[in-house]
Amino acid sequence: MQILSYIGRRLIFVAPQLVGILLVTFLLLKLIPGDPAVMMLGPFATDEGLARLRTELGLDHSIIKQFGIYLWRVIHWDLGTSWQTTMPVTSDLAQRFPATLELVTLSLLLALSIGMPLGVIGARSKNGIIRKLVEYYGLAAGSLPDFWFGLVLIFIFYTILGVVPAPLGRIDFTIIPPPEVTGSLLIDSVISGNWLALRNALGHLILPVLTLGLINAAPILKMTMSTMDRMLEADFSRYAEMCGLPDRVVARKALRNSLPSVITIVSVLYGFLIGGAVLVEIVFSWGGAGQYAVQGVLNADLNPVLGFVLYSAILSLVIYLIVDLIYFAIDPRTR
Amino acid sequence: MSEAANSETMDQTVAEPLLECDGVYVTFPRYGAEEAVALRDVSLTISRGEVLGLVGESGSGKTMLARAIMRLIPQPGAITSGSVTFEGTNLGELDPEALRRMRGRDIAMIISNPRGELDPLQTVGQQIGNVLRYHLDLNSKDVRERALDLLKQVSIPDPQRRLDAYPHELSGGMAQRVVIAIALACSPRFIISDDATSGLDVTVQAQVLELIRKLVSERDTSMMFITRDIGITAHYCDRIAIIYAGEIMEVADRGVFFDDPLHPYTVLLLAAFAQNERLRRYWLGEDKVRENSGPSAVGCAFQNRCVRVQQRCLAEHPVLTEHRPGHFVRCHFPVERP
Amino acid sequence: MSILTVDELVQHFPIGGSKSVVRAVNGVSFSLDKGETLALVGESGSGKTTIGRCVLGLIEPTGGRINFDGTTLGRHRTVRSPELRGKLQLVFQEPAESLNPRMRVFEQIDEPLRALKMPRADREAKVRLAARRVGLAESLLERFPTEISMGLQQRVGVARAMISEPEIVVLDEPTSALDPTARAEIIDLLIRIQRELGTAYLFISHDLSAVRHISHRIAVLYLGKIVEQGPSAKLFAQPSHPYSVALLSSVLLPNPRIKSGGKIRLSGEIPSPINLPPACYLAGRCPMVIDRCRETMPPVEMVADNHSVRCYRHKEVSELDKDFDSFARFQSEADRILGAGIPEPIKIGIPENAGDR
């Protein structure tokens, strides 16, 4: 019951948090030089034309009023249109956000399944060669730029070996994508039973997921290893040793006690990668949400940027809520 | 010297020795300096059913001795010399797996700060169960029954409910009882209690001490009771050993020990309780201006704090000698009483 | 004559996110005379530390009054107020934590004087005097706290508290983190300084052998109430409250023949100060409990001069054991054991050959 009231209390603050995030983003965007009217009409626009367009776009109002108008529309789930794609932002994002989510989720799953076991192994083999190797991996992966690593992978596996499809989007142009249900190509192909599309989409996912997964395994690895180190030194581990419990049981206890920090770092990475994967998205022409937002910033196209921020903020809040629920499940002290 | 001396104690107490430490050295290598000696020539025997009190201040090596017996010396320390024999087996010759099976089953530990030493994420029942499962191969149902039975033995109120409690839900005294239950789980022949009651309130401490003593004597278990409070040992131990700077300074049966202590350090420990101000002042050396005087590496380790220090103590390291039958002391000038 | 009077002090702490409160102190009254030591004795949850903090003005009491040197302490008049600065001082339980690891011993001791804005030249001499007073060698003044033993660290703590020559020092478990010998040394040191400077001590502790030594009067606390208060010797010899008896019985003196009284054994543990028992707080644990104890809180009764107790059955309790004082019984034993090594005639001080070491 306690947990329900906790979730309730959390939800009360969601709306003001979102408005705050939007306001800050709105003001920051207004600080960036660049007049959308000029961008839209091009270099040969007349002064009257620009003035008319500004009035149409509502740019002649005060910033606060502009924000008010925007907020009013958001409440009615109208995020405006992008003048670049001429499509409503909601429908653009409906396509692009799942693309990014799919990429980031799979990458983090990979990162977690590499980083956590390696961290545990490293922590358990104190002063051994294995620990050294694990540390080197963490160092190397932590210092490589992800887009560069992606390019290297493309060069090896596409250009030289030719074992993966071209880094051009999420699925071959020649293959008809499954009807959109969730926006995730994998899930949608499974739903519609389109195995050809599934195979192809998987092929396209391999390199970007490998890129992000191998790079982001590093922070997970370091966090797991340092927390495990601490937990294996903790009083309860020494006591378990003195009770003659097998090493693996002691390690399992230590791992369980380390989980909260691992989950924290994963959640932070998740929120970060929604926008932070943009360079990798560009390298693989992924057409994801980060790419969409960056285009918007570069072209003074405000609505896509705000829409992206709103989506990411909601996602982050959901992730943090889930993290809290996991803590709650793991640690009796939080109950 | 100490070896021969110890075998005589055994004869005296009749019972065969359960545990025997013989000339144990534990050292820690240090970069660019001489290695640090944590235990120096420690020889002790503990007979069946005997409770030995080991008294020392923080950093004296008393916990290190417990860890040396358990073969759990923290890195990079090591037992560099001497042996620990338990029921005729030299523990140094056992492989890691055999040592693991010995810990918790044959030799159990009761520690201080029980709430920090229990796993915060497991229930009391699970933690008692772990020990039962890995040492006695019991199935889940038996484990739970046995755990419940153990909680009853350590007089925990409402044991059924406590079985599913987490450590943070227990009071200090309650958690200490759980740790005692874990120690008793496999009916060990030897229990080491390391400062087990220091964190408890005094009225609770009295309850826990009574409980430990009762359980140990009922089962004829031997025990090493490590503490920094010499007062406790007078009432709960059969024999007392004093450790200072990793060395045993004095060992004797309780009656003799408190009646006629020989080492100036022992007397100093007793003086801390006395009311007579002049005697207190003399032994505590109150009027002396304090330098940072730790144990000395040359000569007698205690020389920097000894009020009776003489020329000989500065140069010559004293050995543990049997001053009178069963009463050992490491001092050139033991305190004589008429 | 009293320089400190505490009158019906109440301190409740609300618990965040709930309606319940921790009732740490529930109506405590006592006074402290010049140059006197009053020990507040109790176990965890007794409220003894909270009382010390209230006296220092570190927390605002929920109710009651604290009067220091003729004026009431409160929100605007605390230890930190300019007119009181340096008159009330504190010695902490954990010497290592109370000292700044990046300051040399000299600067630590100097700290209160700097707060008093005393000129540098005067301070220097005062610090050296204070260090000598607590038996710290001159050479230690340039060390950092981490370089010296815990016993010496606590001497620094005492020197720092004493340097402004305060009227009252609150000693919050100053010995409980120390080894027994260091403990005894600090107690002896505090006694000597009190004789020299006439400082009053509020000595907060659960360590009864220390309390026996240093205090003139004792107040025994249980769940934020004083259950018994009286002169030290009287209380140790003939305690009148079951809780005092149990507390004193738990003292283990280093002599197997001297068993503590032990006529009263408390069951269970201290209840939570969030849900206090309805009448006498000890009723749930006391072997001498009667129905009345569960119905109304016993009033404070005077059993002798300056000796008060809060128990319906205090007469019976005080007559349980005529030969109760184990410290007194230990005395003759201790004299024999300790007297032996001392060169005749008893010389106080150190033998010549150890003097230059």
Image: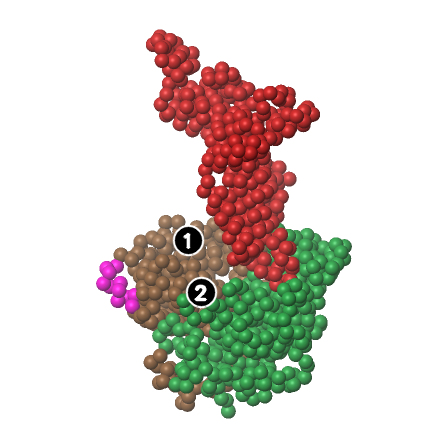
Chain colours: A red, B green, C brown
**Reading the chain from its start, which is encountered first: label 1 or label 2?**
1
What is the CA distance from the residue labelled 1 to the residue labelled 2? 18 Å
Which residue lies under the disc numbered 1? C58
Q: Are marks 1 and 2 in contact (CB under 8 Å)?
A: no
Q: Is residue B23 left or right of residue B15?
A: left
Residue B195 sits above or below residue A184 on the image: below
Q: Which residues are magenta?
A: C118-128
Is A280 in the magenta? no
Q: Residues within 10 Å of mark 2 (few under 14, many from 20)?
A: many
- Residue C218 visible? The answer is no
The residue sitting at 56% across, 55% down in the picture is A125
Give coordinates of residue B165: x percent, y percent.
Answer: 66, 52
Q: Is residue C142 left or right of residue B163?
A: left
Give coordinates of residue C205: x percent, y percent.
Answer: 49, 65
- The chain identifier of the residue carrying mark 2 reads C
Mark 1: secondary structure:
loop
Image quarter of residue B215: bottom right
Is C120 in the magenta? yes
Image quarter of residue C249: bottom right
Residue A136 sits above or below residue B68 on the image: above
- Residue C347 visible? The answer is yes
Disc 1 marks which amino acid? Answer: Leu
The residue sitting at 62% across, 27% down in the picture is A200
Mark 2: secondary structure:
loop
Disc 2 marks which amino acid? Answer: Pro
- The chain identifier of the residue carrying mark 1 reads C
Asked whether C280 or A236 is in front, the reply is A236
Which residue lies under the disc numbered 2? C174
